Image (cartoon, grey):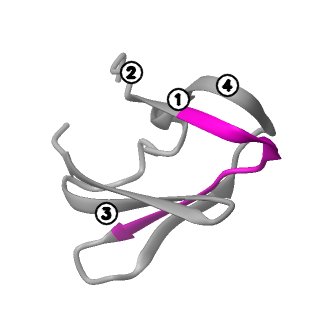
């Protein structure tokens, strides 16, 4: 705990609502949630809100759905 995971993104449309999906190594959804509305401009997404303390150590794959764009990030969680 105390770690702060962030991702910086630029939004080019009027408003979007990001959706987050975190998959474990087996392809199962570990976390699924929606974020706050994002207006046009630069935003810092707080990923530590998605990385629940109940998650086990391991490799996860984060997908952030932003309207017509999907961002993918591999995360290795070590506590």
Upstream in the sequence, badge 1 or badge 2? 2
Upstream in the sequence, badge 4 or badge 3? 4
Upstream in the sequence, badge 2 or badge 3? 2
Instruction: Find out whether residue 34 is within the magenta segment.
Output: no
Which disc, if any, is residue 4? 2
In the rendered structure, the answer to whether residue 15 lies left or right of residue 70 reads right
Going 27% across and 56% down the picture, which residue do you hit? 56
Which disc, if any, is residue 61? 3
Instruction: Find out whether residue 15 is within the magenta segment.
Output: yes
Q: Position of residue 23 (x, y in %)?
A: 38, 70
- Magenta-drawn segment: 10-23
Q: Are marks 2 and 3 in contact (CB under 8 Å)?
A: no
Which disc, if any, is residue 2? none
Going 16% across and 41% down the picture, which residue do you hit? 78
Q: Are marks 4 and 3 in contact (CB under 8 Å)?
A: no
Instruction: Give the CA separation, mark 1 to mark 3.
Output: 16 Å
Q: Which residue is denoted by mark 4 in the rendering?
A: 41
Looking at the rendered structure, the secondary structure element under dot 4 is strand
Upstream in the sequence, badge 1 or badge 4? 4
Q: Residue furthest front?
A: 12
Instruction: Give the CA separation, mark 1 to mark 2.
Output: 7 Å
Q: Residues within 10 Å of mark 4 (few under 14, many from 20)?
A: few
Q: Which residue is denoted by mark 1 in the rendering?
A: 46
Which image quadrant is residue 2 in? top left
């Amino acid at each position: 705990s105390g770690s702060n995971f962030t991702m910086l993104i630029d939004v080019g449309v009027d408003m979007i609502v990001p959706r987050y999906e975190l998959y474990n190594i087996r392809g199962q959804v570990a976390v699924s949630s929606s974020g706050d509305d994002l207006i046009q401009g630069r935003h810092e997404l707080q990923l530590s809100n998605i990385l629940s303390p109940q998650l086990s150590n391991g490799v996860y794959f984060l997908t952030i759905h932003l309207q017509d764009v999907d961002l993918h990030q591999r995360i290795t969680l070590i506590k």
